[in-house]
Image (cartoon, rainbow, N blue to C red):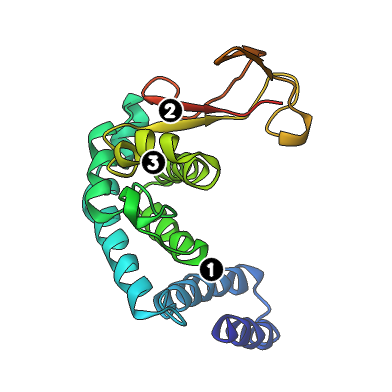
Amino acid sequence: MFKVINSCTRLASYANKYTNKAKVFYNFKCLASFTKRDYSSSLDMSIGLSDEVKEFQLLALDFAKKELEPNMQKWDEQGHFPVDVIKRSANLGFGGLYCDEKYGGTGLSRLATSVIFEALSTGCVSTTAYISIHNMVAWMVDSFGNEKQKNKWLPSLTAMEKLSSYCLTEPGSGSDAAALITSAKQDGDNYILNGSKSFISGATVSDVYLVMVR
């Protein structure tokens, strides 16, 4: 950042030497382009990270470069949801990043997983967003489910044999969890759900849906 600020300061002094505004603008564009490249190339994404997190970061960057980036534009243009590629990310441990290892999870911290998602998003932001959603579902089952539920759902979720979505957003309250109105009423061994959900990421492809209710 210092390089960019310092360069802009020098640019101001350069402007005083020119009377031709077009020439000043041209030099500003050239310098801005240069400083942007210089700044981005000097950024080390691994500063302050543990060796373990750095390894996962490199795995994610490599996966993004090879599997996501070359296909991102084509997927968007064709409206394609890359289920096969998403499931391959499970081979790197990306299917249960927050989950306990005994259920097939990777057991990483929130910081570590945010680094992984950041690295994956360099290849495709929307695909990374879905992977993060799948991980949140697995985390909720791991954090709030009973042992029977964990054993039933987590192994297939962490291995991405089953993909998942959480159902939060509603037509009347958006994605404000405190304002949702969908309810669940127990009826014997079952629950009766009453309400509507909308804009659910992965709604046409997910196998498991975790519905947020009152």
Q: Is residue 94 visible?
A: no
- Residue kind at label 3, given as amino acid type: Thr
Closer to the camera in the image, 130 or 211: 211
Write down the quadrant of residue 18 in the picture: bottom right
Q: Earlier in the sequence, mark 3 or mark 2?
A: 3
- Give neighbour class at mark 1: few <14, some 14-19, many 20+ (Cα, 10 Å): few
Determine which residue is flagged by label 3: 127
Verify CB contact (< 8 Å) between mark 1 and mark 3.
Answer: no
Quadrant for the N terminus, please.
bottom right
Quadrant for the C terminus, please.
top right
Q: Residue at x 44, y 73 (%)?
A: 40
For label 2, the SS is loop
Determine which residue is flagged by label 2: 202
Q: Residue at x 47, y 31 (%)?
A: 165
Q: Earlier in the sequence, mark 2 or mark 1?
A: 1
Percent coordinates x, y for residue 131 in the rendering: 40, 43
- Residue kind at label 1, given as amino acid type: Lys
Percent coordinates x, y for residue 183 in the rendering: 70, 19
Percent coordinates x, y for residue 24 in the rendering: 61, 74
Determine which residue is flagged by label 1: 29
Mark toward the viewer: 2 or 1: 2
- Residue kind at label 2, given as amino acid type: Gly
> Whole-Å distance between the Cαs marked 2 and 1?
42 Å
**Does residue 168 appear left or right of residue 105 in this picture?**
right
Q: Earlier in the sequence, mark 1 or mark 3?
A: 1
**Does residue 28 appear left or right of residue 59 in this picture?**
right
